[in-house]
Amino acid sequence: MKKRIFYIISFLVIFCVEVLIALYVRDNFVRPYIGDVLVVVLVYCFVRIFLPTGIPRMPFYVFLFACFVEMMQYFQLAETLGITNRVARVVLGSTFDWADIACYAVGCVLIILFERLSQRK
């Protein structure tokens, strides 16, 4: 239960940071890079709420999911489905970028490092 609470709080904090970045940050570093690194951490924390003990290679699966979403941006899923809702378009994204995939990889590496450090304690 302790892990589940940790991941709930982590999810809520990261979610709030992501919303603040999306609404108020208009720069060339935090929004495009830090936001993308944090989004995989956000997804990971969300999954860990329901699977507090984790599963092997979960950061890799989160990375694959993020890459899948990015590929859907390449194929312009939001336009194909006719999605006009601003929030839905922000969540799905609308522009494919290889740098996003690199950011997702960095986020997953940070998750792995965090998990290894926390297991040692």
Image (tube, rainbow, N blue to C red):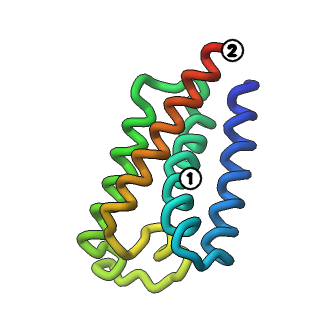
Q: Residue furthest left?
A: 75
Q: Earlier in the sequence, mark 2 or mark 1?
A: 1
Q: Nearer the viewer, residue 65 or 105?
A: 105
In the rendered image, residue 4, in percent from the top left (x then y), is placed at: 69, 31
In the rendered image, residue 69, in percent from the top left (x then y), is placed at: 36, 59
- Quarter of the image with the C terminus is top right
- Amino acid type at circle 1 is Leu
Q: Nearer the viewer, residue 56 or 30?
A: 30
Left or right: 23 in relation to 89: right
- Which residue in the structure is indicated by mark 2? 121
**Measuring 73% from the left and 52% from the top, which residue is drawn there?**
13
**Measuring 47% from the left and 76% from the top, which residue is drawn there?**
89
In the rendered image, residue 24, in percent from the top left (x then y), is placed at: 68, 77
Say above or below: 99 vs 53: below
Left or right: 120 in relation to 92: right
Say above or below: 70 vs 102: below
The disc label shown at residue 4, or none:
none
Q: Nearer the viewer, residue 90 or 105?
A: 105
In the rendered image, residue 36, in percent from the top left (x then y), is placed at: 49, 58
Q: Residue furthest front?
A: 28
The disc label shown at residue 38, or none:
1
Q: Nearer the viewer, residue 55 or 82?
A: 55
- Per the image, label 1 sits on a secondary structure element best described as helix
Q: CA distance from mark 2 to mark 1?
A: 24 Å
Say above or below: 107 vs 56: below
Task: Count all numbered tags in the image, as a single digit.
Answer: 2
- Per the image, label 2 sits on a secondary structure element best described as loop
**Measuring 69% from the left and 60% from the top, which residue is drawn there?**
17
- Amino acid type at circle 2 is Lys
